Image (tube, helix red, strand yellow):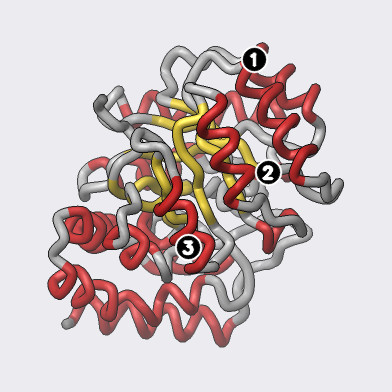
Amino acid sequence: MNNPFLGTGIAIVTPYNQDGLVDHEALKKIVNFNVENGTNYIVISGTTGESVTITKQEKKEIIKTIKEANANRLPLVLGIGGNNTAAVIEEINATDLSDFAGILSVSPYYSKPTQEGMYQHFKAIAEACPVPIILYNVPGRTAKNMEPTTVLRLANDFENIVAVKEAGNNLQQYYELLRDKPEDFSIISGDDDLALGVVLAGGSGVISVIGQAFPKEFSKMIQLGLEGKAKDAYNIHFKLMEIVGLIFSENNPAGIKAVLKTLDLCSDKVRLPLVEASSELKNKIESFVSAFYKS
């Protein structure tokens, strides 16, 4: 089966103008920059897209802009998730998903459900969703880890649950998932710093933050990893290590937006309660980008 979630997906930012409104022209620039430089698919309205501060109307407009700019060139994934199961299902039912390869659905946050609660949450979503589902485990944000046994139970029980974006920054957990997963279930790294190692161990790729700023280099690194060319892939990994650390040092997406501003792709504006990267961080990012393109 052709896997649309192979290689480098990007968790695309939502750019704003100085008035704090969505900058649709900048959004088109980021889409085209990624399509033209090797990105394999685009994830809309995830954490990096500041989904929690986007209105329902803005989300519709963002989808429209990205679809138009993409022009069917890359598969699209839509973030639809939350800690209110009924509301997630309501959004799925109210959304035209015909142009999407799948949805990315985050594990419930704040409520801290048990593993059985997580299973029942995603069971209800799977029974309602007409397109493939990528589970999203990010315990640093949800305050509750979705354990490998729960992920694998869902993978085995529902044909339309096809992958997990694992972002626990825990290699042991990745290895358990890779060892025990069904053959046609994909393990996608949600940790830019660990992505190459996960791919070399059998993962399908990454949904990346930094990838949207360095799509040519990052997607090549992941492709080399998929081909088992570890030495060549790690040469790129080592070149990008510093910037990956920098963009997450204060907050995501403040860090990646500072990089994108340096590349003249969008402003670095974020919505409260987030704030822009500090002057110190911006200076480090500018220095890295300048040196990277001189090397």
Residue at 14 percent of width and 55 percent of height: 227
Amino acid type of the residue tagged 3 in the rendering:
Asp
Nearest to the observer: residue 246 or residue 30: 246
The residue where tag 1 is placed is 128
Specify whether 235 is left or right of 57. left
Image coords of residue 50 (percent x, y): 64, 48
Q: Quadrant of the C terminus?
A: bottom left
How many angstroms separate mark 1 from mark 3 (CA)? Answer: 29 Å
Per the rendering, the mark at residue 107 is 2
Tag 3 or tag 2, which sits nearer the N-term? 2
Other residues around mark 2 within 10 Å, as few (<14) / some (14–19) / many (≥20): many
Nearest to the observer: residue 171 or residue 80: 171
* Camera sees residue 21: no
Vertical arrangement, residue 144 with respect to residue 250, above or below: above
Per the rendering, the mark at residue 191 is 3
Specify whether 292 is left or right of 134. left
Dot 3 lies on which element?
A: loop
How many angstroms separate mark 2 from mark 1 (CA)? Answer: 16 Å
All told, the count of numbered labels is 3
Image coords of residue 84 (percent x, y): 81, 32
Residue at 53 percent of width and 61 percent of height: 173
How many angstroms separate mark 2 from mark 3 (CA)? Answer: 16 Å
Q: Which picture quadrant has residue 98?
A: top left
Amino acid type of the residue tagged 2 in the rendering:
Ser
Q: Are marks 2 and 1 in contact (CB under 8 Å)?
A: no
Q: Are marks 2 and 3 in contact (CB under 8 Å)?
A: no
